[in-house]
Amino acid sequence: MTRRRRLAAGNWKMNGTSAELAEISAVITAHPAPDCEILICPPATLLERMSRDIGEAPIAVGGQDCHREEAGAHTGDVSAAMLVDAGAAYVILGHSERRQDHGETNDDVRAKARTALATGLRVVICVGETLTEREASNTLDIIGGQLAGSIPDLVTGENLVLAYEPVWAIGTGKVPTTDQIGEVHDFIRLQLEKRLGEGVALSVRILYGGSVKASNAAEIFAVSNVDGALVGGASLKAADFAPIIVALDAAGQRVPG
Ligand code: PEP
């Protein structure tokens, strides 16, 4: 039976210059042979150097966004091919900060994902409700709409990762209860099964993101259908990220079904 390899993904957002590359060396020293997969998504300016510094160590790097077009007159944007050229294996798409700051819609996310997949990248597609939507009991409707609208048809169990990130939990220190996380992750798995069939759906990893830290990681990783985490603030320092990797390794691998 195939297992879903757990994934600890760090999103550095608009943080980090070359001085911070030392944090990755510290993660490698702390975890020379992790059971889980480790992914770091630094700002685009650091991708190539981080990728070179990592060398043969078992850490993947990824972008935080890419353009929907392959190339062209789009000042300031980064293409999927540029990410690959700089060493990226993954790209985060549809992060709530992109949806909020840049007005990205589900259509935009789906178009970007199509281009990224065609370029050979794996995609981490983010979904999540705002506090207003949760308080109005609309969480599952919102997540269902984001899944239906953001996931393109080309996906497989290997090239798609989902991240459930309640907007109100990102960078706030507020975390949903384990029941709330489990409800959404089980719902996402069910929607994936309906859309992609059981075989593919059971191979897709579903990450939780939103104020994950060393003190809450083990509890979150024990929740049904949580296959890892997308970590923002606590991924910036090896001292904060390394214990999250320890907790993920301790949680063991997921067996689908
Ligand atoms: C994120 O940016 O994806 C995130 C989850 O941030 P934080 O861990 O800081 O809440």
Image: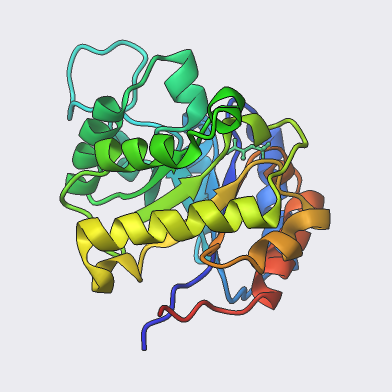
In the picture shown, does residue 253 fall above or below 90? below
| Percent coordinates x, y for residue 181 in the rendering | 60, 53
- Residue at coordinates 50% horizontally, 66% vertically from top-left? 56
Q: Examine the rendering and report whether any part of residue 103 can be seen.
A: yes
Please tell me which residue lies in front, 11 or 105.
105
Q: Nearer the viewer, residue 243 or 22?
A: 243
Give the vertical position of 207 relative to 224 (above or below).
Answer: above
- The structure residue drawn at horizontal position 66% and vertical position 74%, both measured from the top left corner, is 249
Question: Residue 30 lies in what quarter of the image?
Answer: bottom right
Q: Position of residue 231 (x, y in %)?
A: 63, 46
Q: Residue, x 37% and y 14% (percent of image)? A: 76
In the displayed orientation, state which residue is furthest to the bottom: 1
Quadrant of residue 188 within the rendered picture: bottom left
Q: Quadrant of the N terminus?
A: bottom left
Vertical comparison of 246 with 241: above or below: below
Position of the C terminus, as image quadrant, is bottom left
Residue 85: quadrant of the picture: top left
Answer yes or no: is residue 159 visible: no
The residue furthest front is 137
Quick one: 162 or 41, which is closer to the camera?
162
Residue 220's x, y, as percent? 68, 60
| Rendered location of residue 217, percent (x, y) | 73, 59
Ligand 1 in which quarter: top right
Q: Residue at x 68, y 56 (%)?
A: 178
Q: How many marks?
A: 0
